[in-house]
Image (spheres, rainbow, N blue to C red):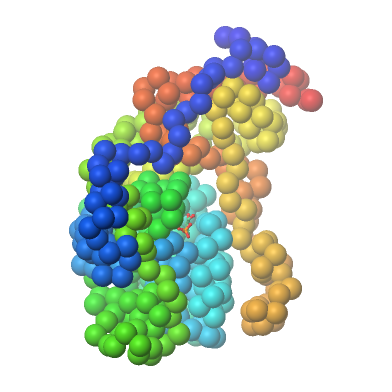
Amino acid sequence: MSDLALFGGDPVRKTPFSSWPRVVSGQKEKLVNTLINDSWGIGSETIKELEDKFAIFQDAKNCIAINTGTNALWVALKAAGVTSGDEVILPPYTFIATATAVLTANATPVFVDIDPDTFNIDSNLIESAITDRTKAIIPVHVGGNPADMERIIGIANKYNLIIIEDAAQAHGAEWDGKKVGALHKGGIFSFQSSKNMSAGEGGAVVSNDEDFMDACFAYYNCGRNRDGDWYEHHIVGGNHRMSSMAASLLIPQFQTIEHDMRIRDKNREKLDKSLSDMGLEITHRYKQVTREANHLYLLRYKEEKFNDISREKFFDAMRAEGVYTYAGYNPLYREEVFQGKGDDFPWLKNLNYSNISCPVTEQISDYQSVWLTQNHILGDDSDIQDIINTFEKVTIALNKNPEKFDI
Ligand SMILES: Cc1ncc(COP(=O)(O)O)c(C=O)c1O
């Protein structure tokens, strides 16, 4: 084995991994057909086709296509009745949109720490965060790995709370044989560029609850009722409608997603097997998870297992070999928006988010998390072998030549 590329050796991987998103068969034809024959927005048959197909794909009765996952979260929270004075429980280990949607719904985010084995909200800690102002829980299926839904649904039902699943990264993931998204009140998805189904930008709400979906319709469509007049506005809604061009990019992906999911399943299994033998800690799944979306590949690096060499030096060595690994999320409560400086969210001024500590999130974010993006997990056998060889080369060097990393 050559010296590490970080120290002048030959890198394992000399060519880039495949890029994402990629064009799939039928997309160009669908786009051109929509362009010429369908409405580009309101009334589009293509958007309706996407909604029908995505609802079926996610085992839900109904779907509304939305222009982003962020707006889908806001729409779902408002439709669930979240309003001024309410608290919403969520993990701090997620994309900022999960928390800012709570703020823009005029409510207060209450952060609950995560389970170190899955990086998902720790269901054991939820009950102690519930107050008489709690309205909803947002479990986030981080990386496409479902959160502990059985426990969370049990808690929500016991305290009469609503669950809105943030399934932005979890297309096709399953809990106990049922796709995520509509396991309780409803859930949201993102079709932003990086996601496993992508239109560049896009989102969706899914649910089995028709009244909830009627409310979503009003919030995403300028406060209109489904059966009301066009210039009749009942509530403050936004225009969060999807364009039919985005729907045209998504529909052909129903032909490819199952194949992609099988590749990701196979590659994740291979990576899990090889990397756990190298002293890296793989993430686990709750026993009721019957399928993961494998949107990200998440690991824990513990420096005490590698001669106290920091994760950042490990990243330097991995990147020099041609495999881009990175740390991912920071604990959301540290973001400036939660430091009470702005005037837009006056109710945050009485809260001191700098007092919050979610020790597991902090340990994982600050020292341990290792992320690989899905274009790596979608690779062929030789791509995956390169990734495994890179982890092996770097971890062997960390174990055998720690003095070299004192740079
Ligand atoms: C967990 C999570 N929630 C919400 C979002 C927001 O989705 P979008 O980027 O489509 O607004 C994302 C996407 O990045 C996400 O990863």
Q: Residue at x 58, y 51 (%)?
A: 329
Looking at the image, residue 395 lies above or below residue 217: above
Looking at the image, residue 184 lies above or below residue 198: below
Looking at the image, residue 48 lies above or below residue 199: below
Instruction: Name the one closer to the observer, 216 or 339.
Output: 216
Instruction: Name the one closer to the observer, 110 or 259.
Output: 259
Q: Picture coordinates of residue 324 (x, y %)? A: 56, 32
Q: Picture coordinates of residue 61 (x, y %)? A: 21, 67
Rendered image quadrant of residue 315:
top right
Q: Picture coordinates of residue 35 (x, y %)? A: 29, 55
Q: Picture coordinates of residue 55 (x, y %)? A: 24, 61
Q: Residue furthest front?
A: 36
Q: Please tell me how many numbered marks the rendered image carries.
A: 0
Q: Residue at x 54, y 75 (%)?
A: 104
Q: Is residue 276 visible?
A: yes
Looking at the image, residue 339 lies above or below residue 121: below
Instruction: Name the one closer to the observer, 88 or 78.
Output: 78
120 sits to left or right of 348? left
